[in-house]
Amino acid sequence: MTNKITYGIGLLLTGVCGVFGIGVISELQAAAFSDFKLLQKIFEADLILPFILFSALGVIGFYIATKAYVSSDNKQA
């Protein structure tokens, strides 16, 4: 179970770092449009596909880590 928890946390961290990086990249690429919101800048910089990919990685990692933790916690009790 520890390997699944580590794998899930790794996916979660990859997703969080990826989403943060996409946000930074979109802010720097679309700096001329200062009145845009962050999500609009992501659309404008054509980074929506990587944004969805990294968001999915984060959600899947959270699910795997939580499921592995809950199942290991029930076995020890």
Image (cartoon, rainbow, N blue to C red):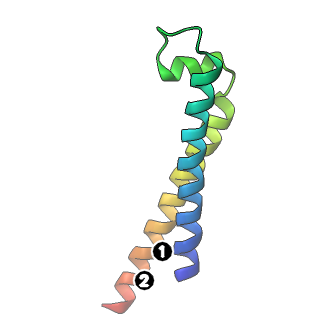
Circle 2: element type: helix
Picture quadrant of residue 74: bottom left
Asked whether the viewer can see residue 4, the reply is yes
Mark 1–mark 2 Cα distance, whole angstroms, equals 6 Å
Instruction: Work out whether residue 33 or residue 70 is closer to the camera in this orientation and state it.
Output: 33
Q: Which mark is residue 68?
A: 1
In the image, residue 48 sits, relative to residue 73, either above or below, namely: above
Q: Amino acid at mark 2?
A: Ser
In the image, residue 41 sits, relative to residue 21, either above or below, namely: above
Q: Residue at x 65, y 20 (%)?
A: 29
Instruction: Work out whether residue 61 or residue 25 is closer to the camera in this orientation and state it.
Output: 25
Residue tagged 2: 72
Circle 1: element type: helix
x and y, in percent, of residue 24 in the image: 57, 32
Residue 74 relative to residue 64: left or right:
left
Q: Residue at x 59, y 69 (%)?
A: 7
x and y, in percent, of residue 15 in the image: 57, 49
